[in-house]
Amino acid sequence: MSSYKANITWKRNSGEKFIDKKYSRLHEWSFEGGTNIPASPSHHIVPVPYSNPDFVDPEEAFVASLSSCHMLTFLDLCSRNGIIVNDYSDAAEGILERIGRNKWGMTKVTLKPVATYVNDEPPSKELLEDLHHQAHEMCFIANSVTTEIVTEIIS
């Protein structure tokens, strides 16, 4: 078993009444390694100036977490199978939708991995599909959520 920690901090700005809902939601995520990330609610949900579109929001972080976990698992599987990956990118996208009365959820995340391989010779489409399927099955984050996760393999 492993334990992971994050420290999330927020403070009301002086002069903000709070109960009028006109308060900053900007906050900070701090991690054990010393990284601090400015965070905000999504500007699609909470308008500026109470949010900041330049900061990471929880929904983006959720999508990034799924993508990152999938990538790390895929890279490990490639390494174990003697496949040398030169680079990897993913333009992942999450869909937030109403899932009930006054209830919203990230219902679908689409991963769109693109990789290049040594000598620009990618593995066969069948092998790539199998490796991505295994990566999905082994991904800790994917195994922790009910969100539909789709992988559109580009290369």
Image (cartoon, grey):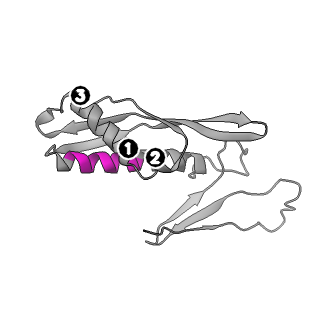
Where 84 falls versus 97 (above or below)?
below
- What is the quadrant of residue 123 in the picture? top left
Residue 7 falls left or right of residue 68: right
The Cα atoms of the two marked residues, 3 and 1, are separated by 17 Å
User: Residue 72 colored magenta?
Assistant: yes
Crowding near the residue tagged with mark 1, few <14, some 14–19, many ≥20 C-alpha atoms within 10 Å: few
Look at the image and tell me whether residue 54 can be seen: yes
Where 137 falls versus 8 (above or below)?
above
Q: Which mark is residue 142?
A: 2
According to the picture, the residue beneath numbered tag 1 turns out to be: 137
The Cα atoms of the two marked residues, 2 and 3, are separated by 22 Å
According to the picture, the residue beneath numbered tag 3 turns out to be: 126
- What is the quadrant of residue 43 in the picture? top right
Residue 114 x, y percent position in the rendering: 31, 35
For the C terminus, the quadrant is: top left
What secondary structure prevails in the magenta region? helix
Label 2 or label 3, whichever comes before in sequence order: 3
Residue 36 falls left or right of residue 42: left
Label 2 or label 1, whichever comes before in sequence order: 1
125, 65: nearer the viewer? 125
**Residues in magenta?**
68-78
Residue 67 x, y percent position in the rendering: 42, 44
For the N terminus, the quadrant is: bottom left
Residue positioned 43% across, 71% down in the render: 33
Residue positioned 27% across, 39% down in the render: 131
4, 120: nearer the viewer? 4
